[in-house]
Image (spheres, grey):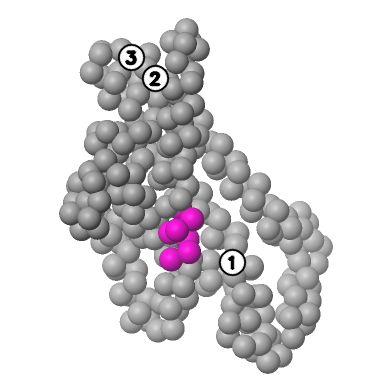
Amino acid sequence: MEWFLANSGTVFTLAGQHLVLAVIPMVLGLLIAIPLAQLARRSSTLRTVVLTASSLLYTIPSLALFIILPTVIGTRILDPLNVIVALTIYAVALLVRAALDAFDSVDDDLQQAAVAMGFKPLARFLQIDLPLSLPVMFAGLRVVSVSNISLVSVAALLGIGNLGMLFTSGLQRDFVTEVMVGIIAILILALVMDALLVVLERLLTPWARAAGATPAGSERATRGSAATVEAGA
């Protein structure tokens, strides 16, 4: 505790760097994964290709990817951009499958009702498919947030600033306290990120809370979704 109080400024600085390196790839990964998942829905062949490619991407060792990327994108080995690109690749690999599951979870009756009411494909996607897929989408985001926060620490082996540097420094000095502070800080960061995503999901999907409250709430939520279709038409 004394070591943490004496070095709290350094820990908070590293935590801020860690958070940036974890959150940016998650957002970029989501922006890439959603159109990819929408494209994959067009045929079973595309779905198989996209899912297979995403699975293969996630099997690439993170440390190897951090080392290879500078030669591919022309950056320096210590450039944080390498970490952002690598974690974006992993985020896309996870989120494509989550996005597909999310879109598949949307009620077919609502989709058909939207088509019958004259919704154009883009309008149906933005007003029906995307909003109603958010609960499943957020489940995938929560997995990616934990994964990214964990993987960022590997970049400390290359000298890129993040909480993982407490591990390398503590191990070099045989100072267990520093390592433990790093572990606890990463756990707290992961819990805070998960809590923020839960709150954001609740704010964006109030109808989902109503559906989960009571059977009557579920019926109201269904009527509310149908009303959304009618309003959009």
Residue 170 magenta-drawn? no
Give the number of the mark in front: 1 or 3: 3
Q: Quadrant of residue 184?
A: top left
**Residue drawn 26% across the image and 19% down it:** 171
What x and y, as percent, mark residue 207? 74, 61
Residue at point 27% right, 33% down?
159
Whether residue 109 is visible here, answered yes or no, is no
Task: Identify the element where label 1 is drawn.
Answer: helix
* Segment colored magenta: 26-32
Residue 108 sits above or below residue 168 on the image: below
Mark 1: few/some/many CA within 10 Å (<14, 14-19, 20+): many
Residue 54, horizontal then vertical, whole percent = 32, 64
Tell me residue 106's x, y (percent).
59, 72
Q: Is residue 161 left or right of residue 8?
A: left
Q: Residue at x 40, y 84 (%)?
A: 43
* Residue 28 within the segment the image draws in magenta: yes
Q: Are marks 3 and 2 in contact (CB under 8 Å)?
A: yes
Residue at image mark 3: 176
Residue identifier under label 1: 133
Q: Which residue is mark 2?
A: 180
Marked residue nearer the N-terminal end (1 or 2) = 1
Q: Kindly identify which numbered label has been placed on residue 214.
A: none
Question: In the image shown, does 43 or 200 lie closer to the viewer?
Answer: 200
Spatial distance from mark 1 to mark 2, Cα to Cα?
A: 39 Å
Q: Main secondary structure of the magenta part?
A: helix
Residue 160 drawn at (x, y percent): 31, 36
